[in-house]
């Protein structure tokens, strides 16, 4: 029997970024799941704070230079790759000069959140999915970790649902305690529209598309939800529970691999 394939789409991964709830799990979960016999791929944004020389990142020419149109503007997609030291984990980095390489994560040096964070999340989502298509890799499950990956579930179930790489893919969204303070801008609903991801699908959400609305959208298009911390937004947890989605409550910092493995089997419909 072929190994099941898990695509991890992470907002943060240590050692490329400082240790945090998000970056630690972004580093530990893929390795743990790989050691349980799954085949994995891992993606994250190439934030401007990442030291490319120290992390030994290099561009993958055959995957790069595609143009993605966001809000009627062309943005070149750059793909870089590196291997986490002392592991068999390769990380693909989504890069773009305007959105990532010259900027920090959600906020600038003075702590002000970037007004185009919504566009950045859209570019990241499309960049990941287009790259996976080029890799000709067909994930059984996509694990989304962090608000930056929250557009992925919508696109998988709408814009990319007919793509051979994703036609049967299940999506799991992890909820963390880290939140955005500001909304994603007035143009988010317009910018997210792509193929079958029509703006009409977003009419049910508030016009002020903030962190909670983003989380609700991710939940609406996911097949399972993980409570990945001890201080997750309660409104989002309750929202997921009300939808009757499979929910993995916080499994703790130790021995979480077995809990995720069992949850993935549940999502895939396996009884064992």
Image (tube, rainbow, N blue to C red):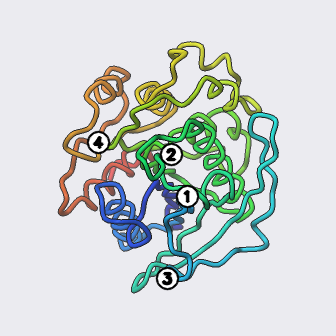
The Cα atoms of the two marked residues, 3 and 1, are separated by 16 Å
Mark drawn on residue 148 = 2
Left or right of 238, for residue 67: right
User: Looking at the rendering, which quadrant does residue 53 occupy?
Assistant: bottom right
160 left or right of 229 in image: right
Which residue is disc 3 drawn over? Answer: 54
Q: Would residue 253 be found to the left or right of residue 183 on screen?
A: left
Q: CA distance from mark 1 to mark 4?
A: 19 Å
Residue 96 or residue 41, whichever sits in front: 96
- What is the distance, in whole Å, between disc 2 and disc 3 at their CAs? 24 Å
Q: Are marks 3 and 4 in contact (CB under 8 Å)?
A: no
**Mark positioned earlier in the residue sequence (1 or 4):** 1
Task: Give the residue displayed 41% in from the left and 82% down from the top.
Answer: 87
- Determine whether the residue tagged by mark 1 lies in a helix, strand or loop: strand
Residue drawn at x 64%, y 60% is 95
Mark closer to the observer (3, 4) = 3
Judging by the rendered image, the residue that carries numbered circle 1 is 45
Q: CA distance from mark 2 to mark 1?
A: 9 Å
Residue 158 in the image: above or below residue 93: above
Dot 2 or dot 3: first in sequence order is: 3
Between the residue at mark 4 and the residue at mark 2, the CA separation in whole angstroms equals 14 Å
x, y percent for residue 54: 49, 82
Question: What residue is shown at x 71% (from left), y 63% (from top)?
Answer: 78
Sequence order check: which comes first, mark 4 or mark 2? 2
Disc 4 target residue:
177
Crowdedness near tag 1: few (<14), some (14–19) or many (≥20) residues, C-alpha within 10 Å = many
Determine whether label 1 and label 4 are within 8 Å by CB: no
Cβ–Cβ under 8 Å for marks 2 and 1: yes
Identify whether 25 is placed above or below 174: below
Between discs 3 and 1, the one toward the N terminus: 1
Mark 4 is surrounded, within 10 Å at the Cα level, by few (under 14), some (14 to 19) or many (20 or more) other residues, namely some
């Amino acid at each position: 029997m072929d190994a099941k394939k898990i695509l991890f789409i992470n907002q943060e991964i240590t050692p490329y970024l400082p240790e945090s709830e998000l970056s630690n799990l972004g580093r530990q979960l893929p390795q743990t799941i790989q050691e349980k016999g799954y085949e994995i791929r891992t993606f994250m944004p190439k934030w401007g704070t990442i030291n490319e020389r120290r992390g030994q990142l290099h561009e993958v020419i055959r995957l790069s230079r595609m143009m993605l149109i966001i809000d009627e503007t062309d943005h070149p997609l750059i793909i870089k790759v590196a291997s986490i030291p002392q592991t068999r984990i390769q990380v693909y980095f989504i890069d773009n000069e305007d959105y990532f390489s010259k900027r920090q994560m959600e906020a600038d040096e003075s702590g002000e959140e970037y007004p185009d964070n919504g566009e950045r999340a859209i570019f990241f989502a499309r960049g990941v999915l287009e790259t996976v298509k080029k890799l000709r890799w067909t994930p059984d499950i996509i694990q989304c970790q962090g608000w930056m990956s929250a557009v992925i579930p919508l696109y998988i179930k709408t814009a990319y649902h007919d793509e051979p790489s994703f036609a049967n893919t299940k999506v799991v969204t992890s909820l963390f305690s880290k939140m955005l303070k500001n909304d994603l801008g007035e143009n988010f609903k317009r910018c997210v529209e792509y193929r079958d991801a029509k703006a009409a699908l977003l009419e049910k959400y508030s016009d002020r598309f903030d962190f909670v609305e983003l989380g609700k959208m991710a939940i609406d298009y996911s097949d399972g939800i993980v409570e990945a911390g001890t201080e997750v937004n309660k409104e989002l947890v309750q929202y997921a529970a009300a939808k009757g989605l499979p929910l993995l409550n916080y499994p703790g910092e130790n021995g979480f691999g077995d809990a995720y493995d069992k949850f993935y089997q549940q999502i895939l419909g396996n009884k064992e």
